[in-house]
Amino acid sequence: MFRAEGKGDYRMLSGRERERYARQLPILGEEGQETLRSSSVCVAGAGGLGCPVALYLAAAGVGHIRIVDPDRVDRSNLNRQVLHAEPDISRFKVESAAEKLQRLNPDITIESMPVAIDDGNIDRVTGGMHLLLDALDSYPARYLLNRVAYQKNIPLIHAAVSGFHGQLTTIIPRETPCLRCIIPHPPEGGSPPVLGATAGIVGTLEALEALKVLTGMGDVAKNILLVWDGRSGRLDQIPVGKDPGCPVCGIRGRIC
Amino acid sequence: MRDQGENMLITVHIRAFARFRESFGDRFDVEVESPATVRSVMLEVGKRNGQGVRDLIDDGGNVKKSVIIMVNRERVTGEARDEHPVHGGDEVALYPPVAGG
């Protein structure tokens, strides 16, 4: 599994860090905690998924979180985007998120990028990152992130939500199917209704998956699409495979 | 060999996920005429819910491209997906991917 070795600094944990992470150090160990501290993660989207993802990664001590989103906070976001509050309305979401995250954990670096991911900035958005987290709400941007993850060989965790439901998969370039293999035709976009708690569950699942990918602990959702059904309280697994004709990673169809 | 004949009814086991579970049911059987295809099975599934069918079948009577279909736990993709043969006793699973963030 991926480890952020050779990156960042390997100083010992400070007394404050030891105190802050006391309840998870028995799980992660000092080495795991230091791996998190030396990890750089891009959270693409500061909305319903991005808020819980960034919140739990900051709390866990991921050392460098880059959060990317072009939008400003709107009152209609507040049913689910739990880092933003009434006084944040009309601020950049990344600014509002960065402030809360930094307040939660002053020992980590939060970088905010108020941009819409496109071909022109994707290198800057993903540069230096060990892991990419899809907390986006559109498939064109997701496909761009997926293509760059494949080109740069960076693991990518995909998640999406609607209503009571959500999905998640972990993409390890050259090992697992890519997002294009799994979802070759995007579902209709728009702004689906979402319960905040659904985004919370799936976003928290995505944060947990990120911690596992970074530290190498546990089994990650490789080659499966995890499907959360909040109405029946069930987490199903749909097996997914590589598409040899995939335009991104397929042996027959590669264009990039 | 019951599913080899023309115009005979065959039974197909359906497994629906997420919103499709809500619309059509969790696990159930449908009866369709043989020879059956992904399309004929999905049209039969769609009859269970007049509203929910809109998430499954497009205006042209095709299964929506975004829908993930598995026959006997094997993903069926590509241009010919809707014509993929389905036999009596097969399990067909369906899932509508979501887009929100």
Image (tube, rainbow, N blue to C red):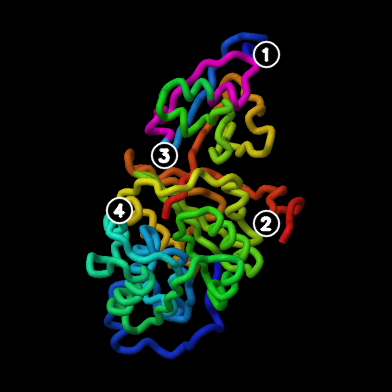
> Which three-letter amino acid code belongs to the residue tagged 3?
Ala
Q: Residue beneath label 2, please?
A: A248
Callout 1 and callout 4 share a chain? no
Element at label 4: helix
Q: CA distance from mark 3 to mark 2?
A: 28 Å
Which residue is depicted at the point 36% across and 44% down?
A163
Q: Residue beneath label 1, please?
A: B4
Foreground: disc 3 or disc 2: 2
Q: Is residue A221 left or right of residue B1?
A: left
Read off the chain for label 4: A
Say which quadrant the C terminus of chain A sits in.
bottom right
Read off the chain for label 3: B
Q: Is residue A82 left or right of residue B76?
A: left
Q: Is residue A76 above or below residue B22?
A: below
N-terminal-most mark, 2 or 4: 4
Q: How crowded is the residue under tag 3: few (<14 C-alpha within 10 Å), some, or many (20+)?
A: many
Question: Can the viewer see residue A26 in this picture?
Answer: no
Q: Is residue B37 above or below residue A20?
A: above
Please state the horizontal and vertical placement of residue B88, each as a whole percent of the image.
59, 19
> Which three-letter amino acid code belongs to the residue tagged 4?
Gly
Farthest residue toward the front?
Answer: A90
Q: Which residues are magenta?
A: B20-42
Q: Quadrant of residue A75?
A: bottom left
Q: Residue beneath label 4, please?
A: A196
Question: Can the viewer see residue A165 in this picture?
Answer: yes
Q: How crowded is the residue under tag 4: few (<14 C-alpha within 10 Å), some, or many (20+)?
A: some
Which residue is depicted at the point 48% across and 64% down?
A133
> Which three-letter amino acid code belongs to the residue tagged 1?
Gln
Q: Residue beneath label 3, please?
A: B18
